[in-house]
Image: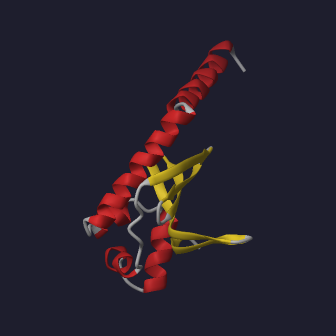
């Protein structure tokens, strides 16, 4: 690898790493995106809810309901989540525990997207979620 090529590679890595932010900044971004999702839920804005879903989650919802996301998401009975209790970020994955819900997210190039919502913990089993990817 030439000196110039190595410099470009190092610069690319630094830009990528620095764009991820500190753990506190990542938790803040996740919290903002979940709050935006919850506001859309409270306001009855299905288009914004669908836009907040990860592509595979949206696809799974539409296939299961056999209808467009905007119609299907309103039929899921998602709880009014309440205040954020904790945010855990693990690389490109996150979990936000709210008063009455747990939401899982994944990092995409255009921000954090919801991969599962309406999730309830179960003793010694995976979460039970109303909306999730397959």
Measuring 47% from the left and 50% from the top, which residue is drawn there? 112
Q: Position of residue 95 (x, y in %)?
A: 56, 54
For the image, the number of numbered tags is 0
In the current view of this chain or complex, which residue is farthest to the top? Answer: 3
In the current view of this chain or complex, which residue is farthest to the bottom? Answer: 66
| 39 horizontally vs 97: left or right | left
Quarter of the image for the N terminus: give it: top right
- Residue 73 lies in quadrant: bottom left
- Residue 122 lies in quadrant: bottom right
Residue 90: in sight, yes or no? yes
92 above or below 102? above
Residue 110: in sight, yes or no? no
Q: Nearer the viewer, residue 77 or 71?
A: 77
| 93 horizontally vs 33: left or right | right
23 above or below 133? above
Q: How is the image coloured?
A: secondary structure
Q: Position of residue 102 (x, y in %)?
A: 52, 62
Measuring 43% from the left and 62% from the top, which residue is drawn there? 53
Quarter of the image for the C terminus: give it: bottom right
Q: Nearer the viewer, residue 125 or 73?
A: 125
113 above or below 22? below
Measuring 29% from the left and 65% from the top, which residue is drawn there? 42
Measuring 34% from the left and 54% from the top, which residue is drawn there? 36
Q: Position of residue 118 (x, y in %)?
A: 48, 70
């Amino acid at each position: 690898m030439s000196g110039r090529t190595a410099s470009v590679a190092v610069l690319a890595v630094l830009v990528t790493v620095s764009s991820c932010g500190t753990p506190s900044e990542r938790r803040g971004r996740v919290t903002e995106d979940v709050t935006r999702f919850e506001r859309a839920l409270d306001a009855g804005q299905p288009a914004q809810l669908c836009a907040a879903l990860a592509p595979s989650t949206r696809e799974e919802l539409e296939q299961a309901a056999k209808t467009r996301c905007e119609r299907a998401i309103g039929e899921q009975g998602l709880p009014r989540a309440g205040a954020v209790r904790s945010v855990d970020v693990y690389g490109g994955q996150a979990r936000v525990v709210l008063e009455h819900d747990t939401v899982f997210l994944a990092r995409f190039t255009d921000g954090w997207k919801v991969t599962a919502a309406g999730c309830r913990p179960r003793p010694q089993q995976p979460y039970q979620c109303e909306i999730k990817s397959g």
